[in-house]
Image (tube, rainbow, N blue to C red):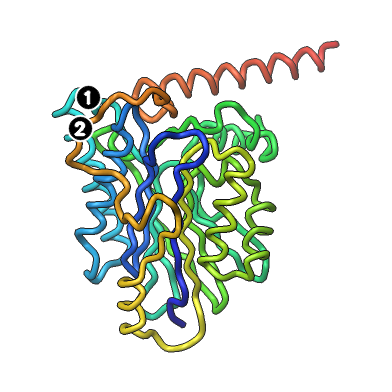
Amino acid sequence: MRLGRAAVVTDTGRRRLGNEDAYVWGPPLFAIADGMGGARAGEIAAGIAAATFEEVLGRTMGADAISEVIADANRRIWERSLADPATAGMGTTVTVALVDEDGETVVFGHVGDSRAYRMRDSVLEQITTDHSLVAELVESGVLTPEEAERHPQRSAITRALGTEPAVEPDVFTVDVVPGDLFLLCSDGLSDMLTEEQIAAAIERAGGEPEAAGNELVKEANARGGDDNITVLLFEIVAGEPDPERTAALEDTARATSPDGPSKNAGDPSASPEPRPDEGLRRHGAGPGGRIAAIVLLVAILIVAALVLYWGITS
């Protein structure tokens, strides 16, 4: 098996003035990062994460190397936030995929609530776990997955790059079969579309990565476009690995959005400037936010227990 077609599309969305998403296109390595923080700090954090991965393109890598690069990106963002008060509290998600040389597995690294999906035999499956408050509430049984999709705190994340001195990423390996299509996306997509709607958009595009990427972005914008939208798709096909074709893919990165073919939407050397529509659009990533998220979770559990007790006693 080998890496087949691939494409990336990024779009500012309908409500943001700038794009704080970044992506890395370095077949067989792909990554997306969704920055957070006031002014342009989120853009800078995502840019640092992307730049860190771009430095290792072309190296032989595995799961351990992915963990090390994520740790390095976390350290760089953290140190930048300490050195520059204007970027204090900034952070970013990251979801990275590395197709193995033999094409039989894909290694994923993940922090935050950007997602990776696999489409196999017309069935879409989320293969990353969101590091978010609502994901914890679903796991504890307080919320159903359907309720989580509409929850007002669905963007409150509990883990991010750069908000603490160290971070614990999820790193895992997935076996693949010919025909598998993988999707990496920022929450500008997953907050706007359900899994069923994502699958339907990919099906309408016939599973072709570039067409599917454009269809997904169009649908997310049609349903509100509340955030920046970045989607990166790649397929696994039958056949022997072809280094020349992989190199050709690297030279023909497709970013078909108006934002242009930028690998790195954030400039790590830039200084933040005020942006009128930006506050801290996500909370819960740093120590204070994490405590607030835990307090909220405990409060919800207490209320649920009281309701259950009242029902039993009455």
Q: What is the distance, in whole Å, between disc 2 and disc 1 at their CAs?
A: 8 Å
- As drawn, the residue found furthest toward the bottom would be 240
Q: Quadrant of residue 311?
A: top right
Q: Is residue 159 above or below residue 99?
A: above
Residue 86 numbered tag: 1
Question: What numbered label is drawn on residue 271?
Answer: 2
Residue at the extreme front of the image, as rendered = 258
Helix, strand or loop under label 2? loop
Q: Position of residue 88 (x, y in %)?
A: 25, 25
* Residue that appears at 33% across and 57% down: 24
Q: Which amino acid type corresponds to the residue marked 2 in the rendered image?
A: Ser
- Given residues 269 and 304, the one toward you in this image is 269
Evaluate if marks 2 and 1 touch, with contact meaning CB atoms under 8 Å apart.
yes
Q: How many marks?
A: 2
Residue at image coords 70%, 14% = 306
Q: Position of residue 189 (x, y in %)?
A: 54, 46
